[in-house]
Image: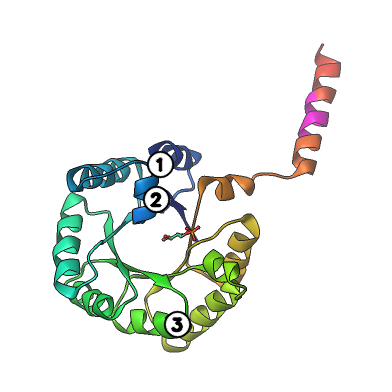
């Protein structure tokens, strides 16, 4: 299972990379805005800075919502660095754009996926990744994890190569359930990844070990 970090914050990306478990980064326009990145030149430079930190795929989202605009923007984005994956929204022109990029060997991440029908379309169009949003479905009292289960089953039935990238993963139980269900990738904030470290018995056990060592080595 790949771990992607869902942020445009360079400090968090560095920290996750230094932990040694980071496989990639996902961003979206809201995450870029949160870091105060504005203006096309700054946005492209920020993507480059992210690519210089990580070894894996970096999803960069198009802003255009029409086919021609998405193609133009995606082609600019992939010039930044070979790690760039073009992130495309699940809308009608987006499906056409997924097919365009797939036919040309350009990797894509189909975002804003909330149903298995949308995921099936993304796979048919040749998306590299599909991003079902677990947390945002939970927010409206629908079971986000059930969607992951359905997509994994559908893709496995037909051998689709599109990777299931569980997005909007908000806490460690989301992440672990996605692992159980066979999601290929999860993307989440740094805190969700580091929360996997924590267990009170690890802390108390370590304190006892160090204390016992100190007693005989004082
Ligand atoms: C990732 O690709 C998505 O943009 C992101 O996971 C959305 O997460 P959120 O619902 O916590 O904003």
In the displayed structure image, the side of residue 53 where residue 182 appears, left or right: right
Residue 136 visible in the shown view: yes
The verdict on label 3 being within 8 Å of ligand 1 is no
The answer to which of marks 3 and 1 sits earlier in the sequence is 1
In the displayed structure image, the side of residue 166 where residue 66 appears, left or right: left
Q: Is residue 128 above or below residue 4?
A: below
**SS at mark 2 in the image:** helix
The answer to which of marks 2 and 3 sits earlier in the sequence is 2
**Front one among 69 and 71:** 69
The answer to which of marks 2 and 1 sits earlier in the sequence is 1
The residue where tag 3 is placed is: 155
Asked if the residue at tag 1 contacts the one at tag 2, i.e. Cβ–Cβ closer than 8 Å, the answer is yes
Whole-percent x and y of residue 177? 62, 66
Residue 127 belongs to the span the image colors magenta:
no
Q: Nearer the viewer, mark 2 or mark 1?
A: 2
> From the image, which quarter does the C terminus lie in?
top right
The residue where tag 1 is placed is: 9
| Residue 61 figure quarter | bottom left
- What range of the chain is rendered magenta? 206-210
**SS at mark 3 in the image:** helix
Q: Is residue 198 above or below residue 129?
A: above
What residue lies at 26% left-to-right and 44% top-to-bottom? 38
CA–CA distance between discs 3 and 1? 32 Å
């Amino acid at each position: 299972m790949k771990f992607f970090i869902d942020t445009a914050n360079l400090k968090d990306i560095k920290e996750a990379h230094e932990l040694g478990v980071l496989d990639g980064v996902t961003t979206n326009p809201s995450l870029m805005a949160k870091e105060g990145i504005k203006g096309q030149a700054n946005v492209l430079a920020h993507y480059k800075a992210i690519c210089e930190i990580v070894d894996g795929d970096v999803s960069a989202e198009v802003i255009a919502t029409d086919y021609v605009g998405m193609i133009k923007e995606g082609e600019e984005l992939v010039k930044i660095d070979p790690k760039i994956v073009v992130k495309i929204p699940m809308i009608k022109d987006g499906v056409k754009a997924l097919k365009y990029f797939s036919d040309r060997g350009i990797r894509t991440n189909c975002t804003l996926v909330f149903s298995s029908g949308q995921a099936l379309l993304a796979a048919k169009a040749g998306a590299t990744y599909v991003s079902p949003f677990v947390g945002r479905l939970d927010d409206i009292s629908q079971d986000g994890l059930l969607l992951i289960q359905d997509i994994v089953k559908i893709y496995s039935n037909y051998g689709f190569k599109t990777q299931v990238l569980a997005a909007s993963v908000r806490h460690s139980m989301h992440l672990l359930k996605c692992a159980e269900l066979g999601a290929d990738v999860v993307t989440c904030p740094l805190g969700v990844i580091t929360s996997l470290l924590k267990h009170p018995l690890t802390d108390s056990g370590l304190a006892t070990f160090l204390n016992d060592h100190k007693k005989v080595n004082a």
